[in-house]
Image (spheres, grey):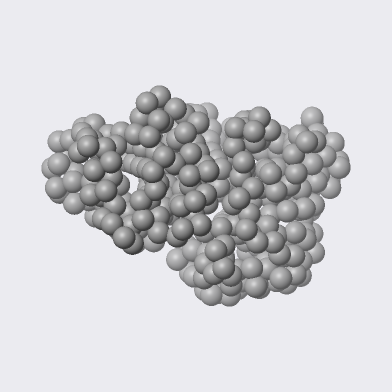
Amino acid sequence: MKAAIFVEPNRIVLDDKKIPDVGPLDALIRVTTTTICGTDVHILKGEYPVARGLTIGHEPVGVIEKLGSAVQGYTEGQRVIAGAITPSGYSNACLCGCHSQDGAGTRHGFRPMGGWRFGNTIDGAQAEYLLVPDAMTNLAPIPDALSDEQVLMCPDIMSTGFSGAESGKVRIGDVVAVFAQGPIGLCATAGARLMGATTIIAVDSIPSRMEIAKRMGADHVVDFSKVDPVEEIMRLTDGRGVDVAIEALGRQQTFEAALRVLRPGGTLSSLGVYSEDLSIPLGPFLAGLGDHTIVTSLCPGGKERMRRLMDVIASSRLDTSPLVTHRFRLDDIEAAYDLFANQRDGVLKVAITP
């Protein structure tokens, strides 16, 4: 099969690989659509370490090609998705209710990113075939009425973005600021709206993204290239600050800005993947006396999470189609990486079809 393989920093290439063997609890899916994530760009640049020769990608949509001997409740030929995070269902983390952290802190040592296995610790989805471990925990059937592209955001982008609002415990009537309106930030904006926020302030500088933010639920958009976003958010909230600030970029500047706009007792919900140490400034942190909450989230996975997200799409509560801006064949994935990593031509997400 063809697969996008990490060779070394700044080199992901399309090459041939053996189709995986299927174990008793596994399922082999034929990938029909996948995409490139910002985390894949961190891998490409060498900012997040993975093994050389690993197939990259963690957002699969496909058809079951072969089921393991112990897998029940599915049929070959069935359309399915699997989350970017693939919990086993029986680890200590899962049994504590923290499915995303399945595998972190085992007796074999700490493994960053918990239950993120595709394109991290096992071969991923940017290939013609993908082996899904613990299939009965992770495979979610796709409703017949939904297309591949309609559910393409569910495995990661939608799940991660929504988790920013969920972990921040957004309530009815809340004021929420979302820093950065990339695909995850846009889904965080939509998630805050679905959870009941009545004032949502989106921060970015790219006009097309700010326009989509309005369609996803933002009441105000702040262009940080024209105004100081902290000052503008405080102006919009009459000096009160926001109940929840969601950081969706992974940089010191946006993290600090999110902290500065919190009301006393507010929550900073961090979604960014950080490649450098963070500093918490004394003033905005109110010397540790502000009753602030800082929470982090890793994309929730598992079949029930995927079912719920597909139900959001099927019920027309959210339209993620504006997020897919470009389409490539798997044969052209190196060109897709070049476009996506350099953020050219207004790219948000690319759909990759083998």
Q: Answer left or right for 58 relative to 299.
A: right
Q: Residue at x 34, y 34 (%)?
A: 175
Q: Answer left or right for 265 relative to 338.
A: left
Q: Residue at x 68, y 68 (%)?
A: 333
Is residue 163 visible to us here? Answer: no
Nearest the eye: 340 or 331: 340
Residue extending farthest to the top is: 172
Tally the marks: 0
Relative height, residue 239 to residue 6 (above, below):
above
The spot of residue 201 in percent (x, y) is 37, 43
Q: Residue at x 53, y 33 (%)?
A: 94
Q: Answer left or right for 306 relative to 128.
A: left
Nearest the eye: 279 or 133: 279
The spot of residue 213 in percent (x, y) is 48, 47
Residue 296: name its quadrant.
top left
Nearest the eye: 236 or 125: 236
Is residue 255 visible to us here? Answer: yes
Q: Answer left or right for 80 relative to 245.
A: right
The spot of residue 18 in percent (x, y) is 78, 63
Quarter of the picture holding the C terminus: bottom right
Q: Residue at x 56, y 43 (%)?
A: 158
Residue 47: name its quadrant.
bottom left
The spot of residue 192 in percent (x, y) is 45, 35
Quarter of the picture holding the N terminus: bottom right
Residue 218: name its quadrant.
top left
Relative height, residue 43 to residue 289 (above, below):
below
